[in-house]
Image: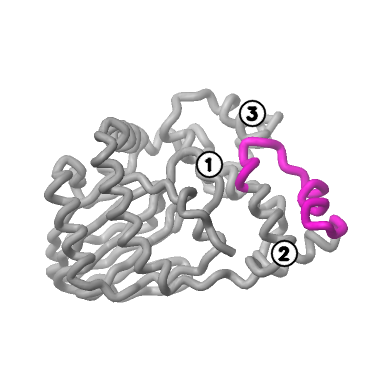
Amino acid sequence: MNIPIESLNFQMLNVGLAHHDGDWNWKNVVSPFTRVYLVIEGEAKLYLPEETVELKPGCMYIIPAHTVHSYECKGKFSHYYLHFYEGFKKETDIFDFYEFPVEVDADSLDESIFYNMCNRHPEAKLPASDPSSYDTMGKFIDYVHRYNELSLDAKLELRGSILLLFSRFVKHAKARVWTKDKRLAQALNYIHNNIYEEIGIDDLASIACVTKSHFIRLFVKTFGMPPLQYINKKKVERAELLLITEDLPIKEIAYDLGYNDHSYFIRLFKKVTGITPMAYRKNMR
């Protein structure tokens, strides 16, 4: 299945070059934006839910948004970093459709792209390496506002640079097996396109042209979870972004995402994230 390039609305939050000496050690980091690293010198470890990756010079690494991860660095370590998000109204999540490699080889062009972005946007450098110093609601809003204030030519240049770097990973990405099944592809597109609406399993089964029970079995077999759990997971991810970027009451966010019972939404949010929406917002301030 092909994702229209127009749907990849990547927007830069931060870019810079960082130098560490055993001081890049952070646990259980999770953010609503994607990270890309290009290692220049030294080594470090990246702990992901399903694997541990050795970060080494000459390679680039990608960490999709909402991925829980940790870092470990025991010596000198230098790397370029890029943080970007896909905008508030993304209709598709390319990481759902393709399985991306965590690591790819980098070349001199990739390093030049990072170098130029850093030189042109020194204001986008992180204030500190500790995620708690920049991964907050206030900072996120500041970074989004800063990007929105850029000139059109600067935005186009940044978008092109990000797409070039991202293309290195796309080149080695593999379409998930389910994408060849039009029934599931159409159902998933419907979920993403209607994330702010109440989504019924009956509607999804109808779109897939199968019975409700068959659709649920097919979905569980493919994604490892029932369709309702997947829908709630995606809605909670969108809620996290809204909690960071909008000063809306929890009740209104719940309604905006198709939950008429905001108490249910609060319980659901806590079940998925481990904390309530209010606690999440407070932690991100």
Q: Are marks 2 and 3 in contact (CB under 8 Å)?
A: no
Label 2 crowd (10 A; few <14 / some 14-19 / many >=20) = some
Tag 2: amino acid: Val
Q: Relative to 123, say whether 114 is above or below.
A: below
**Which secondary structure lies at badge 1?**
helix
**What is the distance, in whole Å, between disc 2 and disc 3 at their CAs?**
27 Å
State the image coordinates of residue 205 (x, y, percent, origin top left): 81, 54
Label 3 crowd (10 A; few <14 / some 14-19 / many >=20) = some
**Which secondary structure lies at badge 3?**
helix
Side of 233 where 94 appears, left or right: left
Say if residue 193 shows up in the picture.
yes
Number of dots carrying numbers: 3
Tag 3: amino acid: Tyr
Towards the viewer: 210 or 221 = 210
Residue interval drawn in magenta: 192-212
Report the residue marked by disc 2: 220
Q: Is residue 198 magenta?
A: yes
Tag 1: amino acid: Arg
Circle on res. 255: 3
Report the residue marked by disc 1: 238
Looking at the figure, which quarter contains the C terminus?
top left
